[in-house]
Image (tube, rainbow, N blue to C red):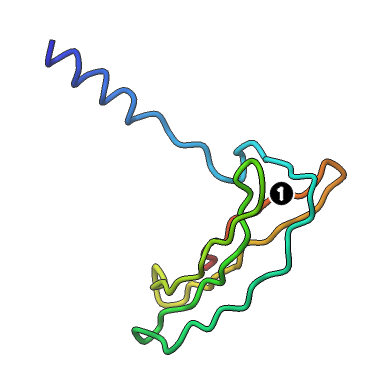
Amino acid sequence: MKKLLLVATAAILSIPSIPSALAQRVYVQIDPPHVIVEHHGPRPHRGWIWVDGHHQWDGHHYVWVHGYWIAPPHEHAVWVPGEWRHEPGGWFWVDGHWRG
């Protein structure tokens, strides 16, 4: 039984995750609120960057997700901020990501 459980767990973990670009978009019919400007204070470590907070749709209304400091994955990485985009189907969120 333990062997079967281990094989099943390994099979599930080996399934590749769906890249965020291919994930199904959730369209929101209500415009996102204006961004809240956060005062993030001094950089905690050299090279870290501030990721701005943003409004997130929770299925019923927008909730604010606070910004945070993050270390780049490597020296020349550039943070591309997330953003709300609009199409005929409504508003959808595009996650921020590292480039380079």
Q: Residue at x 60, y 38 (%)?
A: 23
Please provide percent x and percent y for residue 70.
41, 71
Nearer the observer, 36 or 18: 36
The residue nearer to you, when weighing 65 against 7, is: 65
Mark 1 lies on residue:
92
Q: Nearer the viewer, residue 89 or 13?
A: 89
The part of the image, by quadrant, that contains residue 36 is: bottom right
Query: Which corner quadrant of the image does residue 58 belong to?
Result: top right
Q: Secondary structure at mark 1?
A: strand
What is the residue that sits farthest to the bottom in this orientation?
Answer: 42
**Quadrant placement of the N terminus:** top left
Report the label total: 1
Q: Residues within 10 Å of mark 1 (few under 14, many from 20)?
A: many
Looking at the image, which residue is at 34% across and 84% down? 45
Up-down relation of residue 67 to residue 61 (above or below): below
Check the image and name the residue furthest to the top: 1
Q: Position of residue 77 (x, y in %)?
A: 48, 72
On the image, the x and y values in percent for residue 85 come to 75, 55
Question: In the image, what residue occupies the spot 47% across and 78% down?
Answer: 49
Q: Is residue 91 left or right of residue 72?
A: right
Give the quarter of the image for residue 64: bottom right
Q: Height in image: 54 above or below 90?
A: below
Q: Which three-letter amino acid code belongs to the residue tagged 1?
A: Phe
Residue furthest out toward the right: 88
| Residue positioned 61% across, 45% down in the render | 21
Where is residue 25? Give x, y as percent: 67, 40
Which residue is farthest front? 60
Q: Is residue 27 left or right of residue 56?
A: right
